[in-house]
C-alpha cells in the first residue's frame, strides 16, 4: 500500500519539476475554460456519445501525424473535423447520429492503433495520445492550442444566444427565423476543435472527463443560464489544473488524476443537488 502511494504521489523536488510543466498548466487552463463552456451545450444537446466518437477519429488523425512525422495537433484537428463533418452530414437525427458514431468509433480507434503499431519512435508518444501527457506540451503546441481556443471562444460568444435558443426549443427557434441547422453545423465544428485540443492533454480515451463531467456536475446544483457555464468552467479548470499539479513528479499519466478530481466534483454536486431537491428545489433544464 505504501509503495502504491509512493508511486501515485511523489512530491520530492516538486518546485524543479513544476517548472517543467508550465506549458501544460497554460494549455490545461485554456482547455478548462473552453471545455467547460462547450460542455454545457454537449449536455443540453445530448452529444456525449458524439464527443467520444470525435475523440476516436481525432486519435486516429494524431496517430497518423505521429507516424508521418508531421504536427500532431494538426493531425488531431484534421481527424476531429472529418468526424464532425461526417456526423453532420450522415447523422441529422439523434438515432441516425448514434448509429453513425457507433460505426465510425471503432473504425477510428482501429486506425489509430494501426498507425501507432507502425510508429517506431518513443513508446511514451504512443501512450500519451491515449491517456494524456504532461511534459510533452511544447511551445508550438501551446501556440496552436491558444489560437484554436481563441477561435472557439470568439465563435461561441457570437452564436451563444441563438445557439442556446435553438438548443432549448429548436421548433420555436426555427419558426422565428433562427438558422437551427446552420448553428448545429457550426457548433459541431467548434466541438471537434475542442476535442482535438483535449486529446493533446488528457488523451483520446478520457476526453469526456473535461467536456461532459464538469457540465453535468454544474447542472446538478443549478439551472441558471449564468451559473451553469460559470460552474462548468470552474469545475473543468479545477480538474485539469489540479490533475496536472498532482501528476507532477509521479510516474503515473495525468489522466487518472484529472478523471478522479472530475468524478469527485460530480459526486459532491450530486449530493448537494439531492439535498436541495429534498428542500424543495425543482431542477429543470437550463433556459435562455
Image: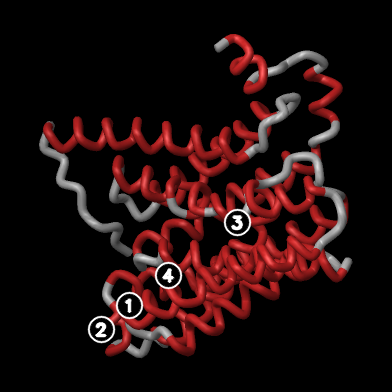
Q: Mark 2 points at which residue?
A: 171
Q: Name the residue under label 3.
A: 204
Label 1 crowding class (10 Å Cα cut-off): few <14, some 14-19, many 20+?
A: few
Say which of 113 and 40 sits in front: 113
Q: In which quarter of the image is the N terminus?
A: top right
Q: Mark 1 points at which residue?
A: 94
Asked if the residues shown at circle 2 and circle 4 are in contact, with their CB atoms under 8 angstroms apart, the answer is no
Q: How far apart are marks 3 and 2 (CA)?
A: 34 Å
Asked if the residues shown at circle 1 and circle 3 are in contact, with their CB atoms under 8 angstroms apart, the answer is no
Q: Which residue shows up at 39% across the image and 47% down it?
A: 227
N-term-proximal mark, 1 vs 2: 1
Dividing the picture into quarters, in which one does residue 146 lie? bottom right
Q: Which residue shows up at 86% across the image and 22% down it?
A: 16
Q: Which residue shows up at 21% across the image and 54% down it?
A: 284
Q: In which quarter of the image is the C terminus?
A: bottom left
N-term-proximal mark, 2 vs 4: 4
Q: Name the residue under label 4.
A: 161
Residue 188 picture location, percent across and down: 51, 75
Position of residue 277 in the picture relative to residue 30 (left or right): left
Element type at mark 4? helix
Q: How far apart are marks 3 and 4 (CA)?
A: 30 Å
Position of residue 176 in the picture relative to residue 129 (left or right): left
Amino acid at each position: 500500500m505504501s509503495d502504491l502511494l509512493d508511486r501515485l504521489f511523489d512530491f520530492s523536488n516538486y518546485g524543479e519539476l513544476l517548472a517543467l510543466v508550465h506549458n501544460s498548466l497554460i494549455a490545461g487552463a485554456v482547455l478548462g475554460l473552453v471545455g467547460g463552456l462547450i460542455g454545457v451545450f454537449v449536455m443540453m444537446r445530448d452529444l456525449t456519445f458524439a464527443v467520444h466518437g470525435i475523440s476516436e477519429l481525432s486519435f486516429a488523425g494524431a496517430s497518423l501525424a505521429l507516424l508521418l512525422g508531421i504536427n500532431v495537433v494538426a493531425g488531431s484537428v484534421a481527424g476531429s473535423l472529418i468526424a464532425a463533418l461526417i456526423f453532420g452530414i450522415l447523422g441529422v437525427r439523434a438515432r441516425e447520429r448514434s448509429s453513425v458514431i457507433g460505426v465510425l468509433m471503432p473504425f477510428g480507434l482501429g486506425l489509430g492503433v494501426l498507425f501507432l503499431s507502425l510508429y517506431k519512435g518513443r513508446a511514451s508518444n504512443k501512450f500519451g495520445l491515449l491517456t494524456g501527457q504532461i511534459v510533452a506540451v511544447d511551445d508550438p503546441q501551446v501556440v496552436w492550442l491558444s489560437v484554436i481556443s481563441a477561435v472557439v471562444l470568439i465563435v461561441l460568444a457570437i452564436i451563444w444566444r441563438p445557439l442556446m435558443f435553438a438548443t432549448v426549443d429548436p421548433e420555436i427557434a426555427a419558426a422565428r427565423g433562427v438558422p437551427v441547422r446552420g448553428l448545429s453545423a457550426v457548433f459541431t465544428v467548434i466541438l471537434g476543435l475542442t476535442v482535438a485540443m483535449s486529446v493533446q492533454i488528457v488523451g483520446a480515451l478520457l476526453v469526456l472527463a473535461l467536456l461532459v463531467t464538469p457540465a453535468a456536475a454544474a447542472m446538478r446544483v443549478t439551472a441558471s443560464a449564468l451559473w451553469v457555464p460559470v460552474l462548468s468552467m470552474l469545475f473543468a479548470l479545477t480538474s485539469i489544473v489540479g490533475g496536472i499539479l498532482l501528476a507532477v513528479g509521479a510516474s503515473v499519466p495525468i489522466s487518472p488524476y484529472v478523471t478522479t478530481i472530475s468524478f469527485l466534483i460530480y459526486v459532491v454536486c450530486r449530493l448537494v443537488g439531492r439535498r436541495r431537491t429534498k428542500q424543495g428545489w425543482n431542477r429543470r433544464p437550463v433556459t435562455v
